[in-house]
Image (cartoon, rainbow, N blue to C red):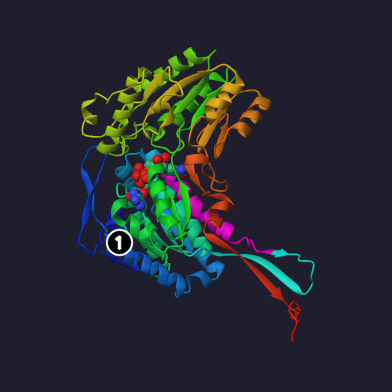
Amino acid sequence: MLTEDELCCGPHLYIDGKWVPAQGGGTRDIVNPADGTVIATVDEADRADAVAAVAAARTAFDTGGWPQTPVAERIAYLLAIADLLDEHRDHIARLETLDTGKTLRESYIDLHDVVEVFRYYARLAATGSDRLVDTGNPAIISRVVREPAGVCALIAPWNYPLLQMSWKIAPALAAGCTMVVKPSEVTPLTTIALMRLIDRAGVPAGVVNLIQSSGATVGPALTDTPDVDLISFTGGAATGEAIARNAAGHITRVALELGGKNPHIIFPDAEFDSAVDAVLTGAFLHSGQVCSAGTRLILHEDIADAFVAELSWRAAGIRIGPGLDETSETGPLVSEQHRAKVEAYVALGISEGARLVTGGARPEAARLQAGSFYLPTIFDGCHRGMRIVQEETFGPILTVERFSTEAQAIALGNDTAYGLAAGVRTADAARGERLVRALRHGTVWLNDFGYYTPAAEWGGFGRSGIGRELGPSGLAEYQETKHIWHNTAPAVGGWFSDN
Ligand code: NAD
């Protein structure tokens, strides 16, 4: 087993099967957001490294034989990576907590899900998806087959660094693609660790390449090039737009998993305590730094006052602290820079006339002053015209709106440019069914919030993105569809005369 140091020691770029430093000698300090200390200094790629990584992936795809690897061999690699991740879960979970600030309990859940996604795609790869088509002519064999999409650029965000990256790497490997992997520059450590394990599993050189750097530095080399066949990106909507523009110049396929502003609608017949609990977790887990966080609470007017009172009391009691401290229920925001963005949104909410019910400040405890902590914050009296209601704050900020009729609840739930996820709580089964069908979001939870499974698709409507991860569609993202028409009895067609 590798030690924690061995998992993330330098050099940190992995290109064509070799660990290398950045050609320009650049490095970046990685900071623990719980106390502001530097936990690692990693090699920072520049454009030339990114170009070399794409070239290695291109060669591995075009002439290296990876796309032709028997599927059983690819499945064996996926399972070996899953086993290695399982074996190293204690180290990797600790690294994820140090890097992102999330609690160790959350990091273990992430790790469990990461292992499961590799195993899921190993199982799915074993089930063929080729199709025979009946043309009505017995001499013709018409087949529709799936083939690997090619060289992929896989770009991930900082909130679920390893989880989001594994949703891309596992299906890309299963499909027979080669790839360049770029984690967020803020949180690269667990992706570096995963790369060590992929190397150890014996995946051939050039199939998976890792560069670590800022998007501004290496982004164009990954997204504005004819050498990449598919870009799979998870991150903010503005970055997604920039990537889509670059991709358009080469008609490169894009899969975009972007942000959300996710409504959570509570009807008066919903069981009160479990509804309060689900709203609390949906909004404040990981300090709200979750793409599907339920940060837009839409309450029936009959229960609104009592609900907000109970929720505020519970929110004020959330134990904030370093992720490695077992008593912490949520950790810091990922960086000082991100906390400043969240604070600006709180100031905006106040200036827009929202009523601050709880939070709206940094915690006072002396032991939390060196970290980028922020209190769970609730604004009541919100309405759809406010930016605080429409924009993704990506922090522990919950807004409250009220409704009186079912039609109003649906209109409010759909009144967002995004469409990633939504929640509904009601004891009325018929109403629940009407709501889950009427809400235009990629995932809708009925009497639950926040759960997912690797076998079910994940992705968004509207500005939340293009395409789906997880499930069979998550594999199809990494495949091209080819129709093979085979004439077993060729004869003269006779369309044109032969004189
Ligand atoms: P971000 O868009 O700032 O960065 C995401 C990644 O893109 C990083 O690796 C970054 O280095 C890279 N990048 C930045 N500019 C680039 C460019 N010009 N070209 C190529 N790559 C570039 O997002 P973030 O702040 O890291 O993450 C938070 C966002 O991610 C939120 O909006 C959140 O909702 C979203 N997110 C969505 C999902 C989902 O499943 N839909 C999941 C997690 C996070």
The question of residue 216 being in magenta is answered with no
Quadrant assignment, res 10: bottom left
Is 119 colored magenta in this rendering? yes
Magenta portion: prevailing SS class: helix
415 over 217 or under it: above or below: above
Residue 180 in view, yes or no: yes
**Residue closest to the far front:** 499
Q: Which region shows up in magenta? A: 107-131
Look at mark 1 in the image and give the residue it sits on: 13
Q: Dot 1: few (<14), some (14–19), or many (≥20) neighbours within 10 Å? A: many
Query: Could you say whether the residue bearing mark 1 is in a helix, strand or loop?
Result: strand
**Residue 106 vs residue 270, the one in the foreground:** 270
- The amino acid at mark 1 is Leu
Query: Is residue 1 at all visible to an observer of this figure?
Result: no
Q: Is residue 62 left or right of residue 142?
A: left
Q: Nearer the viewer, residue 270 or 337?
A: 337
Residue occupying image coordinates x 22% and y 30%: 367
Residue 338 vs 6, above or below: the answer is above
